[in-house]
Amino acid sequence: MPFFYRGAGVGTFWHQRDARLDGFVPRRPGQTPSKNQVIKHIASGTVDTPYVSLTRSYGIAWTYAIECGLAAPNKEQPAFVYEIELSDPLPQGLELVDPVSYIARKFPPPTADSSYYHNGDHTFLLGVVNERWVRMAVAQNTAVAPTQYVRQPPSAQGTPRAPNLSPELETLVRALRDAEILAVGNVPASCVCSRYEVW
């Protein structure tokens, strides 16, 4: 039976509420799930969707718990990592969505005018994976990842521009980075088997 995890930083909603008692409920449980809602949830980081983010990686949940709270955790006020056990058949009304395969099924063919492909250098995706790295690089005045210009052939006289980063590509990269699975519906408290204190 697979385990899933969810980090809760100090002062966040699931830090103040005990999911072992309440389970996990999306902010917009009645909203229709869609590609745009998946992109909004993952690429934009908006939690006002019909999804609850889970991860297959304890390390990712730990990082979110440590780094994404309103205050730094410590022994007196720890952050939490929830462990959730889900297997087939899922609890009634619960569906799990793999955002990578879901978004990939909706791509146009490679010959389409609009595409999820980027046109940056080999370091471009590193900045999508770790935006802090980009901010540090910009602060140190080094052009990397999404702050770089698109390289053009020697004869090109085009206007310098940033590489293309489609919402679909950003969603794919972040979902892969976070080993993310989206839950549609309520994750019952009976599936939340542990809450670890971390700092």
Image (spheres, helix red, strand yellow):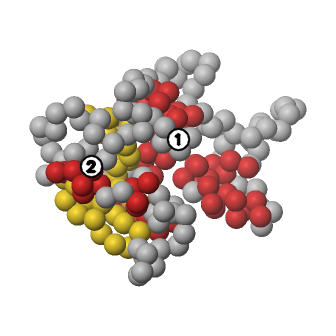
Q: Residues within 10 Å of mark 1 (few under 14, many from 20)?
A: few
Residue occupying the point 45% across, 35% down: 49
Residue occupying the point 30% across, 69% down: 196
Q: Amino acid at mark 2?
A: Gly
Front-lying residue, 23 or 175? 23
- Dividing the picture into quadrants, the one containing residue 27 is top left
Which numbered tag is attached to residue 24?
none
> Would residue 107 be seen by someone viewing this image from the given angle?
yes
Residue extending furthest toward the bottom: 75
Q: Which mark's residue is nearer the viewer, 1 or 2? A: 2
In terms of secondary structure, where does tag 2 sit?
loop
The quarter in which the C terminus is drawn is bottom left
Verify CB contact (< 8 Å) between mark 1 and mark 2: no
Residue 9 position, x and y percent, is 46, 63
Q: Residues within 10 Å of mark 2 (few under 14, many from 20)?
A: some
Residue occupying the point 42% across, 33% down: 28
Q: Amino acid at mark 1?
A: Thr
How much space separates mark 1 and mark 2, taking CA atoms? 20 Å
Which numbered tag is attached to residue 46?
1
Residue occupying the point 41% across, 26% down: 31
Residue 8 position, x and y percent, is 41, 60
Residue highlighted by disc 2: 23
Q: Is residue 103 above or below residue 27?
A: above
Residue 155 position, x and y percent, is 84, 33
